[in-house]
Amino acid sequence: MRLSSIRHQAMKHPGWLISFFTALMITTVPAYGQRYDSAPSDKAMKPPASNPLNAAKVALGKRLFSDTRLSFDEWNSCSTCHDPYHGFSETRAVSIGVLGHRGKRHAPTLLGRGLGQSQFWDGRAATLEEQVLMPIVDPNEMGTTVEAVLQRLHQDPAYRGLTRESLADALASYVRSIRSENSNFDLFLWGGPGAFSDLELEGLRLFRDKARCYTCHAGTRFTDEMFHNTGVAWREGALQDEGRAAITAKSYHKGAFKTPTLRDVSRRGPYMHDGSLATLEDVIEYYDRGGNHNPYLDENIVPLHLSDGEKKALLAFLRTGLAGSVRDGVTERSLHRN
């Protein structure tokens, strides 16, 4: 449906436009080519019963998140790579950890990870409680042990009595509170008048149609929480990173990585699991040419043949249509999220 037709229907039938695009954004899209894991369940998107969300725990987690005593050299904290001022991601292509050790992947955003089914680019952690402790013991990240961290923290009266479990629970609770709200897209869904510019609206139409973004960036969270080979890991005739396959040992997961949310995507370049694309313009150009062909490429990655005007509209939707307020901490609404 072209933009002119959309406008015509919207003028004749108030509310039609919102219903039309809402239905499009929440449609379940079948995956072709590779075989993928199942979509996230409601159970996976809620805090576990063993770690209910409360304000005190989130506040403790927020303090720990920025505490450099979690790393061996007391130089890095969680916020070093997951910068709150950069959409809880990082400005570098790949992370630099303890003693200057260089990682092989870009730190993914933490926006909305409380609603995720699995964590990390390769999904190796099933829960946030599991995930938040793994960087502490990774030799390329914080390079220490949980026991050493606790011993160090116990010297601070504010942390006395902290255990491995309560450390994980606090950090996980804080990460669950990190979200993006009140974007033009949200205002559009709520029926806000003039929420989108004409260019953003055309970008949304393309997102759901010719540009095919919706096949992976589905729903109002703009991620299917699944793993896809988009060709980014394929260079010089070989996979540079096995991705999900290193965890599952399944051939259909070779070079596949978790789909990140696109909420506030304009805040957090560079992009992709390896930080290899510097700007959103680079990302659009990459997908427009059909990615990097390889034996495991997702069937949905094909040349798009977007015009310059269409690229401009798609960029507007991504850059300003999905830009919201990045927030952390507990509010009445986040405590009682359905």
Image (tube, rainbow, N blue to C red):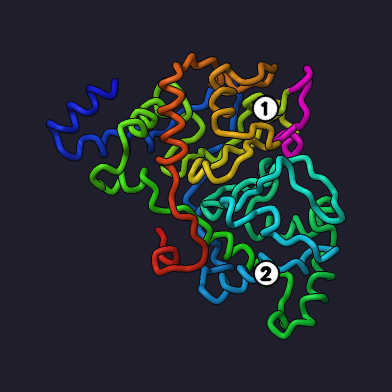
* Label 1 Cα neighbours within 10 Å, binned few <14 / some 14-19 / many ≥20: many
Q: Which residue is mark 1?
A: 232
* Label 2 Cα neighbours within 10 Å, binned few <14 / some 14-19 / many ≥20: many
Q: Amino acid at mark 1?
A: Val
Magenta stretch contains residue 284: no
The Cα atoms of the two marked residues, 2 and 1, are separated by 34 Å
Q: Which residue is mark 2?
A: 64
Residue drawn 51% across the image and 74% down it: 55
Residue at disc 2, secondary structure: helix
Residue drawn 46% across the image and 38% down it: 319
Q: Quadrant of residue 273?
A: top right
Q: Residue furthest bottom?
A: 157
Mark nearer the N terminus (2 vs 1): 2
Image vertical order of residue 66 relative to residue 128, above or below: below
Residue drawn 64% across the image and 51% down it: 126
Residue at disc 1, secondary structure: loop
Q: Nearer the viewer, residue 318 or 72?
A: 318
Residue drawn 29% across the image and 20% down it: 2
Image vertical order of residue 171 relative to residue 117, above or below: below
Q: Is residue 107 left or right of residue 104?
A: left
Quadrant the N terminus occupies: top left
Q: Nearer the viewer, residue 149 or 29?
A: 149
- Residue 320 percent across, percent down from the top left: 42, 41
Q: Is residue 102 left or right of residue 200?
A: right
Q: Quadrant of residue 160?
A: bottom right
Q: Nearer the viewer, residue 338 or 112?
A: 112
- Residue 338 percent across, percent down from the top left: 40, 58
Q: Amino acid at mark 2?
A: Leu
- Residue 71 percent across, percent down from the top left: 80, 63
Region of the chain picked out in magenta, as a range:
235-248
